[in-house]
Image: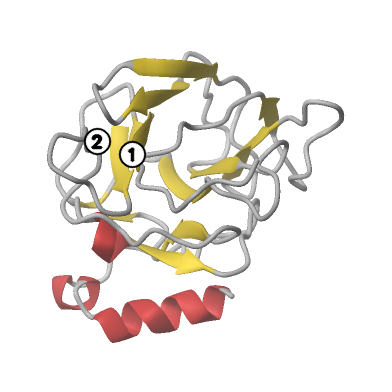
């Protein structure tokens, strides 16, 4: 279905405790498409980046209502992260297969019109949250994209606890493709250099 501009938060929640900001224990939320062009049915996805062979059994993705923090849906994960380090969870179509190419797991999900949250333990919050709404993101929210745009992590293993620094919009979503730069954490100055982050994202495109 078509949806108005969304104000959601996305969170990726690991079973273990969080390490210090910077390079993080994998998996991490890598890319999400939460508002497709035309219909959302069978087109949405949540992409994870992690160590190949990591089991996702026992993990889950939760939708959290931004108005009151209530969990509105739960998607149980299963399987292992493949050799390329990318695991794609795709929404299944109501009357047919998912439209997301290369999906590793297909489930039925659709996040509420915002603000909303999706929880797995590192957080990706995007859009503008008004007073009284429930923000489950980190730091400053990433921008809210237009229909068909996804939010993608700029560096493969970087989580600075600031969504605006860690994620940027992609006009053409890339489910199942490698992150921008699967390399060790760059220096702190690089993490806050907007120009370099933008350059890295353009390379991904």
Find residue 179 and name its label.
Answer: none
**Residue 86 left/right relative to 23:** right
**Residue 90 left/right relative to 74:** right
Query: Could you say where residue 152 lies in the image, as x and y percent from the top left?
Result: 46, 59
Where is mark 1, residue-wise? 115
| Gap between marks 2 and 1 measured at Cα | 10 Å
Query: Could you say where residue 124 lies in the image, as x and y percent from the top left?
Result: 33, 46
Q: Residues within 10 Å of mark 2 (few under 14, many from 20)?
A: many
Where is the N terminus found, in terms of image quarters?
Answer: top right
**101 in relation to 188, above or below:** above
The residue drawn where x is 67% and y is 33% is 91
**Residue 123 left/right relative to 18:** right
The residue drawn where x is 46% and y is 19% is 59
Q: Nearer the viewer, residue 23 or 74?
A: 74
Q: Nearer the viewer, residue 42 or 115?
A: 115
Regarding mark 2 in the picture, which secondary structure is present there?
Answer: loop
User: Between tags 2 and 1, which lies in front?
Assistant: 1
Where is mark 2, residue-wise? 136
Residue 11 in view of the camera: no
Query: Could you say where residue 106 lies in the image, as x and y percent from the top left?
Result: 70, 28
Q: Residues within 10 Å of mark 1 (few under 14, many from 20)?
A: many
Regarding mark 1 in the picture, which secondary structure is present there?
Answer: loop
């Amino acid at each position: 279905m078509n949806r108005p501009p969304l104000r959601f938060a996305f969170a990726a929640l690991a079973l273990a405790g969080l390490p210090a900001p910077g390079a993080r224990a994998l998996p991490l939320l890598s890319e999400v498409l939460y508002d497709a062009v035309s219909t959302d049915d069978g087109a949405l996805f949540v992409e994870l980046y992690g160590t190949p062979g990591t089991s996702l059994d026992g993990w889950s993705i939760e939708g959290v209502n931004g108005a009151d923090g209530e969990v509105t849906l739960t998607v149980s994960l299963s399987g292992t992260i493949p050799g390329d380090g990318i695991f794609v969870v795709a929404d299944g179509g109501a009357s047919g297969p998912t439209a997301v190419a290369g999906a590793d797991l297909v489930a039925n999900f659709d996040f509420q019109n915002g603000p909303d949250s999706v929880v797995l333990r590192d957080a990706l919050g995007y859009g503008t949250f008004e007073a009284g709404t429930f923000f489950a993101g980190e730091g400053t929210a990433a921008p809210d994209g237009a229909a068909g745009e996804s939010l993608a992590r700029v560096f493969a293993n970087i989580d600075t606890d600031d969504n605006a620094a860690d994620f940027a919009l992609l006009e053409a979503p890339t489910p199942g493709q490698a992150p921008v730069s699967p390399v060790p954490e760059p220096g702190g100055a690089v993490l806050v250099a907007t120009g370099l982050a933008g350059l890295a994202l353009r390379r991904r495109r």
